[in-house]
Image (spheres, rainbow, N blue to C red):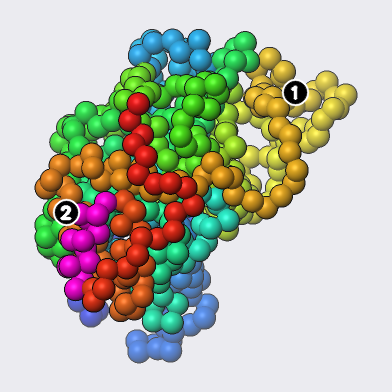
Amino acid sequence: STHGDAAVKTGAAGETHQTAGGDRPVLTTQQGIPVADDQNSLKVGARGPTLLEDFHLREKIFHFDHERIPERVVHARGFGAHGYFENYGSLADVTRADLFQRAGEKTPVFVRFSTVAGSKGSADLARDVRGFAVKFYTQQGNWDLVGNNIPVFFIQDAIKFPDVIHAVKPEPDRGFPQAQSAHDNFWDFISLTPESMHMIMWVMSDRAIPRSFRFMEGFGVHTFRLVNADGKSTFVKFHWKPKQGLQSVVWNEAVKINGADPDFHRRDLWDAIGAGDFPEWELGLQLFDEAFAEKFDFDVLDATKLIPEELVPVKPVGRMVLDRRVDNFFAETEQVAFCTQNIVPGVDFSNDPLLQGRNFSYLDTQIKRLGGPNFTHIPINAPKCPFAHFQQDGHMAMHNPKGRANYEPNSWTADPGPRESPEKGFQSYPVQEDGPKQRIRSETFADHYSQARQFYISQTEVEQGHIASALTFELSKVETPAIRARVVSHLLNIDDGLATKVAEGLRLKATPKPADAAKPTRQDLKP
Ligand code: HEM
């Protein structure tokens, strides 16, 4: 035979035995014991019973029984690929981050795209936000830019995250709907959460049904900081702009694709990379300082707001190319662990209260999802630069400290282990903080409608029509009339025409009053 296959034999009941030999290695157990027969369990006589003594049978089935790990609590369905980030030129004036210092330097990346609400087996074309998570394996450790394809978010404070996700996921009594926002719980929560209105406009737009992952933008969403070698801080918003352009499907197409090929998006990425048609994005920065931030009508710490690109243009600083498929979906795409907390020297956080909560959440959930504290030992999560620390033991420990020292300071001369470095080490930006301890939402977060309206009126007539149809369709699935009316009362603060279309589409008996707005609405954000 062509590949050095040794004989293929037929067993007593006609079962196929392909035996080792030539290039074909011998099948073994996990312990390395060679296996003689993988088709039949060990029995007494020809017809059983099967013996408990059959360690090969028991090991094979035990291992299979434990193949599943918990799916991600959000963003369960996703697809990843490898590639690189190529830096255009030195950004030393704004950041000391190593990957941004030299023109043409390439940093390896792993990217995972995802939907948010559906479970691991849900359909790709759900109306949903798409995750856009990038792990940069830099020479100063891993930097994760854990973004979405929409530049704003549903909520302003991480304390509301369990609520918004509970509301969008299947209702607890009935366990459905699976991956659609169209249900009472979701719209009930939204109608009682006016801060979500800007995000809702994006989620009801064509952005939420992208043609493929290759035709989406990506956004870091929060305001972050960049810090240069002199300790100067600049605020930054991160953007990914697809070189392929921005494309969506229409709802009728999405529905059909979900039925005919629920793997449409993952297949698209797999096929494009396989064919050598590598998708590419430009990384862009919106840079501004604290004094400039004070001049906005909104708060740059509020994740329901974006910074209009007319006010702060997006500066392209590099490109990312995805040029390699994963070798193994589980090992890489499923086990990858992104975390907003993973930042490198030269990047820092802002006080955005959503970001601050995320910084706790990711590591916490991954300890459970990946079975303990050693998931950085999994190759996809390990840094690709030298690393050394005294963390040890725990489930699945693959590399423990060498020698006697597992603490510092120590006075050992043989294998004393790593030492801290004030020059090279991460230094938090020493921002001055002062104020009473209190559980409060800042008044500067109060305008929930201006940017929602700004987004709506920026759309073409056709796109506006899609938003109205999406809202009408989604709300038509809501059974409780008061919830429908409450959503329309918010739409009245965004755009009369839109509110009227949706109210008519839903055949609302009476037009509700506009929702109370804590701040005067409809102020035009344009300079
Ligand atoms: C997962 C983005 C808000 C908790 C993810 C993923 C993305 C993402 C892209 C998928 C990562 C992957 O591919 O493995 C965002 C964005 C947010 C946001 C852009 C807002 C701007 C939050 C908040 C929390 C949170 C506020 C919690 C307080 C989680 C958790 C996971 C996750 C627990 C699952 C992680 C895992 O199991 O590995 N998020 N998220 N996210 N997010 Fe967020």
Residue at x-position 60% and y-position 15%: 232
Three-letter code, disc 2: His
Residue at x-position 58% and y-position 56%: 159
Residue at x-position 11% and y-position 47%: 462
**CB of mark 2 within 8 Å of CB of mark 1?**
no
Q: Looking at the rendering, in which quadrant would you find the C terminus?
A: top left
The span picked out in magenta is 495-507
Q: Main secondary structure of the magenta part?
A: helix
Label 2: which secondary element: helix
- Residue 464 horizontal/vertical position (percent): 18, 49
Q: Which residue is mark 1?
A: 419
Q: Is residue 322 left or right of residue 294?
A: left
Residue at x-position 41% and y-position 54%: 196
The image quadrant of residue 75 is bottom left
For this rendering, which residue is in front, 200 or 8?
Answer: 200
Q: Is mark 2 within 8 Å of ligand 1?
A: no
The image quadrant of residue 398 is top right
| Numbered tag placed on residue 123 in the rendering | none
Three-letter code, disc 1: Arg
Label 1: which secondary element: loop
Q: Which residue is mark 2?
A: 466
